[in-house]
Amino acid sequence: MTLTPLASAAPETGGPAPDRLLSGNPVFTTWNEYESPDGKRFAGIWRSTPGAWRIRYDEWEYCELLEGRSVVTHDDGRSWTLGPGDRFVLEPGFTGIWEVVETTTKRYVVILP
């Protein structure tokens, strides 16, 4: 087994693509603390200020909310209100809306196809 320590990551900032933005002016800050040598696996911390945008997942993502409050709504109408301590997985093919109600910070692990 090989242990890979998480690096001290410099933050990157951005936001949702303009064609996906539904409300607000959310700013994303991402600290990508790990990237696999093949570039298909990532882990780190992500934070967003309030706003709402359309989401479409081609990848698998495990999330654990550390702070804040968000609502994730699937296109089929199912909705989840998420807060600190909530953990969930978004799978490839998931489409819907992510709304950050209170600035949200999550830990993530992403696996690309």
Image (spheres, helix red, strand yellow):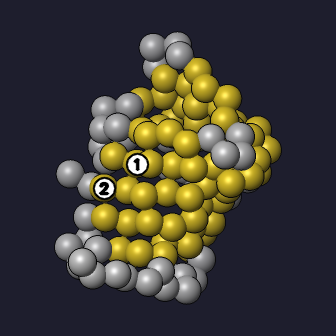
Q: Residue furthest top?
A: 77
Q: Disc 1 marks which amino acid?
A: Glu
Q: Are marks 2 and 1 in contact (CB under 8 Å)?
A: yes
Looking at the image, is 10 positioned above or below residue 44?
Answer: below
Q: Camera-side residue: 38 or 3?
A: 3
Residue at point 71%, 40% (across, down) = 83
Label 1 neighbour load within 10 Å: few <14, some 14-19, many 20+: some
- C-alpha gap between disc 2 and disc 1: 6 Å
Residue at point 29%, 74% (across, down) = 36
Q: Tell me where residue 7 appears, x and y as whole percent.
A: 49, 85
Q: Camera-side residue: 27 or 89?
A: 89
Q: Tell me where residue 87 appears, x and y as whole percent.
A: 55, 42
Find residue 88 and name its label.
Answer: none
Residue at point 66%, 35% (across, down) = 82
Identify residue for label 2: 111
Residue at point 49%, 72% (across, down) = 32
Label 2 neighbour load within 10 Å: few <14, some 14-19, many 20+: some
The answer to whether 5 appears left or right of 92 in the picture is right
Identify residue for label 1: 61
Q: Disc 2 marks which amino acid?
A: Ile
Q: Camera-side residue: 42 or 13?
A: 42
